């Protein structure tokens, strides 16, 4: 039987997913995972990336650890090469509005933001701009990653071993290192 995921927001055709996650209570530890873009997960089933996040929360964290998934860009694509060549500003504004609204109801002390986009962030120049806006909305939160890739990006869930401890992730330094001409 598939579990329902009550935190779910998408556009009318479910071509853009803005938010997906478990039911959350005030005392839960929350891991907000930030990936590049949604793949096939929906309110009734997980894709491989979210299955790994779910397993990590259940097996390696506190019993009351819950997860929520946001992405740098909300467009669904099983391959990030299929992302829009130019940002869809209307969809992006809805995405960042959803992120800010979710954070407005969260305590910083029991919430971790987990960076997991890997080198996929290099697929489109606008993804760094999306990250900058997400970071500017969440500077007071603790940012972490599984580990860093050889190229200096936070490791994606797929292919990563479950970490005993998450590593600190300095988003400001990362943005400074990889900023684009138009940032």
Image (cartoon, rainbow, N blue to C red):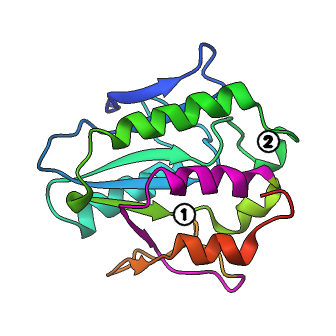
Q: Does any portion of residue 36 appear in the rendered image?
A: no
Residue at figure coordinates x 78%, y 50% from the top left: 126
- Asked which quadrant contains residue 148, the reply is bottom right
Determine whether the residue tagged by mark 1 lies in a helix, strand or loop. Answer: loop
- Examine the rendered structure and indicate whether residue 32 appears above or below residue 5: below
Residue 43 image point, x, y percent: 43, 28
On the picture, is 111 further left or further right than 147? left
Q: Does any portion of residue 65 appear in the rendered image?
A: yes
**Is residue 102 shown in magenta?**
no
Residue at figure coordinates x 33%, y 49% from the top left: 67
Q: Residues within 10 Å of mark 1 (few under 14, many from 20)?
A: many
Say which residue label 1 marks: 116
On the picture, is 174 further left or further right than 137? right
Hey, which residue is sitting farthest bottom in the picture?
150
Which numbered disc covers residue 66?
A: none
Residue at figure coordinates x 34%, y 32% from the top left: 5
The C terminus is located in which quarter? bottom right
Residue at figure coordinates x 57%, y 46% from the top left: 71
- Asked which quadrant contains residue 111, the reply is bottom left
Number of marks in picture: 2
Residue 101 image point, x, y percent: 39, 34
Mark 1 vs mark 2, CA separation in Å: 17 Å
Magenta part of the protein: which range?
126-151
Residue 113 image point, x, y percent: 41, 60
Residue 149 image point, x, y percent: 63, 81
On the picture, is 146 further left or further right than 133? left
Camera-nearest residue between 141 and 58: 141
**Is residue 128 shown in magenta?**
yes
- Asked which quadrant contains residue 4, the reply is top left
Among numbered discs 1 and 2, the one appearing first in the sequence: 2
Hey, which residue is sitting farthest top in the picture?
12
Say which residue label 2 marks: 83
């Amino acid at each position: 039987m598939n579990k329902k995921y009550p935190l779910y927001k998408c556009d009318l055709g479910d071509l853009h997913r803005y938010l997906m996650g478990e039911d959350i209570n005030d005392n839960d530890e929350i891991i907000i995972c930030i990936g590049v873009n949604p793949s096939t997960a929906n309110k009734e089933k997980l894709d491989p990336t979210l299955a790994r996040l779910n397993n990590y929360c259940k097996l390696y964290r506190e019993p009351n650890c819950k997860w929520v998934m946001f992405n740098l860009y909300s467009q669904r694509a099983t391959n990030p090469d299929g992302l829009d060549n130019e940002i869809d500003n209307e969809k992006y504004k809805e995405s960042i509005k959803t992120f800010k609204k979710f954070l407005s109801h969260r305590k910083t002390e029991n919430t971790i933001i987990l960076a997991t986009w890997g080198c996929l962030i290099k697929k489109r120049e606008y993804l760094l701009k999306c990250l900058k806006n997400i970071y500017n909305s969440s500077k007071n939160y603790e940012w972490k990653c599984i580990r860093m890739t050889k190229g200096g990006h936070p490791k994606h869930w797929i292919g990563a071993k479950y970490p005993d401890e998450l590593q600190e992730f300095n988003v400001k330094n990362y943005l400074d290192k990889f900023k684009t001409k138009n940032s």
